[in-house]
Amino acid sequence: MLTLDANVWVAAFDPRDAHHRESATFFEMISRQKLALHGPAIVVLEVTCALARRLRRVGPADEAARWLRAYPALQLHPIDEGLLDQALTLGSERGLRGMDALYAATAVLMDASLISWDSELIQRAGALSPIDWIASQTDSDGGRNDKGKS
């Protein structure tokens, strides 16, 4: 199980993003493995707004929102009291921004690996970049690694 930060989704949707190629490769891999994905429900809003602002076009952003809502492997979690309490604890203990704390809390509550391009989430919340997650799935001789959370 994986919890994906909004920046991973945005990079995958935006071909001009510096991490687009790596994000696309990451999504190809997790799609082949049919991994369960989790995210706070606000991920749809974050991705849509980031794309609309970046691309200065509503169409592709709205298309991304529809795609996220329909993506069968993605379970969206409402920001309820349990998620909020976990985010408050993680955010204050680890010095996270509010939205980052929601992604970290979702990962903790779902016992999922947190994936992000954000160096603060990597350093403070134990997130892995998509590149590092892919590397963790492959052992030194190029075979599949069956250890750890998927």
Image: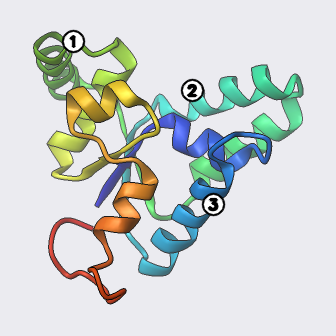
Dot 2 amino acid type? Glu
Q: Residue at x 31, y 73 (%)?
A: 137
- Horizontally, is 131 left or right of 94 in the view? right
Dot 3 amino acid type? Ala
Local SS, label 3? helix
Local SS, label 1? loop
Q: Are marks 3 and 2 in contact (CB under 8 Å)?
A: no
Q: Nearer the viewer, residue 73 or 15?
A: 15
> What colour scheme was applied to this rendering of the protein?
rainbow
Q: Which residue is mark 3?
A: 24
Q: Quadrant of the C terminus?
A: bottom left
Q: Residue at x 57, y 71 (%)?
A: 28
Q: Which residue is mark 2?
A: 46
Splitting the image into 4 quarters, where does residue 103 fall? top left
Mark 3–mark 2 distance (CA, rounded to whole Å) = 19 Å
Give above or below for 106 relative to 58.
below
Residue 122 locus on image (x, y percent): 30, 35
Residue 35 locus on image (x, y percent): 38, 69
Q: Residue at x 36, y 86 (%)?
A: 142
Residue lying furthest front: 140
Give above or below for 145 relative to 41.
below
Mark 1–mark 3 distance (CA, rounded to whole Å) = 30 Å
Q: Quadrant of the N terminus?
A: bottom left
Local SS, label 2? helix
Sooner in the amino-acid sequence: mark 1 or mark 3: 3
Splitting the image into 4 quarters, where does residue 33 fall? bottom left
Mark 2–mark 1 distance (CA, rounded to whole Å) = 21 Å
Q: Which residue is mark 1?
A: 95
Dot 1 amino acid type? Gly
